[in-house]
Image: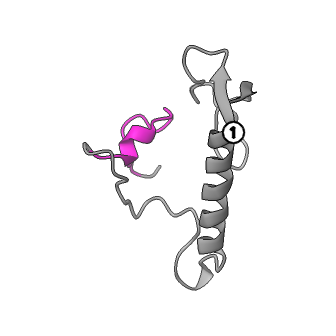
Amino acid sequence: MGAIIWPSPHTFSPARHIDESGKFVYSPKVIPFGIGRRACIGESLARSEIFLMFVGILQRFTITSGYSNLPTISNEHLGLFYGPKPYKVRLEHR
């Protein structure tokens, strides 16, 4: 079995990628678009589109959930990636 990179790897914790000042901490272990010759040629376009879409949603809607805490992956939903089990959120026009 491989070495554990982060403590509690099965716990959803975006804070492990953010430093004390709130800035993203680069890690060579996180490679969402690949590297080298096999890197995604559309990475810059994809990042721009994701940003615009996400900002558009946040500008137009208030996002609420029926959960007091977000679901964890302790009872993970295993597919191609680990992730939380499906849950519902509510989008309300601002």
Q: Quadrant of residue 72?
A: top right
Q: Which residues are magenta?
A: 3-19
Kindly give the residue lying farthest to the front in the view shown: 94
Viewer-proximal residue among 66 and 10: 66
The residue drawn where x is 65% and y is 29% is 62
Kindly give the residue lying farthest to the left in the view shown: 20
Q: Quadrant of residue 74?
A: top right
Q: Position of residue 30 (x, y in %)?
A: 47, 59
Q: Is residue 87 visible?
A: no
Q: Quadrant of residue 82?
A: top right
Instruction: Determine if the magenta segment contains residue 15.
Output: yes
The residue drawn where x is 71% and y is 26% is 89
The C terminus - image quarter: top right
Secondary structure beneath label 1: helix
Viewer-proximal residue among 15 and 36: 15
Vertical side of 62 occupied by 16: above or below: below
Vertical side of 47 occupied by 13: above or below: above
Number of on-image labels = 1
Q: Is residue 25 visible?
A: yes
Query: Which coloring applies here?
Result: one colour
The residue drawn where x is 66% and y is 76% is 42
Instruction: Determine if the magenta segment contains residue 47.
Output: no
- Main secondary-structure element of the magenta-colored stretch: loop
The residue drawn where x is 57% and y is 24% is 70
Q: Amino acid at mark 1?
A: Arg
Vertical side of 60 occupied by 94: above or below: above
Q: Position of residue 61 (x, y in %)?
A: 69, 34
Looking at the image, residue 9 sits to the left or right of residue 44; the answer is left
Neighbours of disc 1 within 10 Å: few (<14), some (14-19), many (20+):
few
Q: What residue is shown with label 1? A: 60
